[in-house]
Image (cartoon, grey):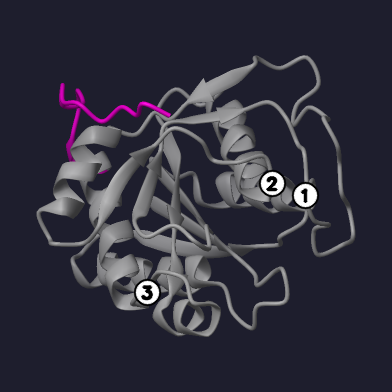
Amino acid sequence: MILLTGFEPFGGEPSNPSWLAAERAALLLREQGRDAVAVELPCVFGQSLDALEAALVRFRPDIVVCAGQAGGRSRVSVERVGINVDDARIGDNAGRQPIDEPVVPGGPAAYFSSLPIKACREAVAALGIPVEVSQTAGTYVCNHVFYGLMHLLARRENSRGGFVHVPFSTEQGEAHGQPGLAIDLMAEALATIATTAADTGADLRATAGAEH
């Protein structure tokens, strides 16, 4: 079973491309004969993890790919690491704005993705979709969910997961004067990341670092 998640709209946006793409990716996977489901998460600290944990209990997935919007980025970003800190520049959809609070009190400083991130990057790049390995998932609800997911999966031996940021949609990008990407391409990328993760054991040994 493959579980994909995306977020509800936030920050005044009328839609969230991460959810639209996750929903379409699950459909693509089912058309390929894969067992897949998509779940929309609230863009709220705490509540998002509650909804994610409920989905893990309900669907018992082998692969989890959580997605979130990163307006301003130009590429699909396969995230490498989630850190144990909530530090919100803006309030979430419930008005919560934590500052320097842990995602999980007493938890490790960070968790690495358990997806084969470089193999995923190569598979998406082969489709001609702009993609990168990212070294930061921020400190907002996306990172909150990424870190929380990995903390939950640390107790599940047969499940692997990680986080992917997607750019603004094409329409959002045009409205904001920022890079944008078609929802269908995002969905194809998420589906490819999920299938690559499901079918790949050891990750590729390839350069995907950053100087800053």
Position of residue 156 in the picture relative to residue 12 (left or right): left
Q: Amino acid at mark 2?
A: Tyr
Specify whether residue 62 is in view: yes
Identify the residue under disc 3: 24
Identify the residue under disc 1: 89
Residue 134 in the image: above or below residue 41? above
Q: Amino acid at mark 3?
A: Arg
Q: Amino acid at mark 1?
A: Arg
Q: Contact, CB < 8 Å: mark 1 with mark 2?
A: yes
Q: Earlier in the sequence, mark 1 or mark 2?
A: 1
For residue 70, which numbered disc appears in the image? none
Q: Quadrant of residue 23?
A: bottom left
Q: Contact, CB < 8 Å: mark 3 with mark 1?
A: no
Q: Earlier in the sequence, mark 3 or mark 1?
A: 3
Question: From mark 3 to mark 1, how far is it between C-alphas?
Answer: 30 Å
Question: From mark 1 to mark 2, how far is it between C-alphas?
Answer: 8 Å
Question: From mark 3 to mark 2, how far is it between C-alphas?
Answer: 24 Å
Is 140 colored magenta in this rendering? no
Most common secondary structure along the magenta stretch: loop
**Magenta residues, as a range?**
198-212
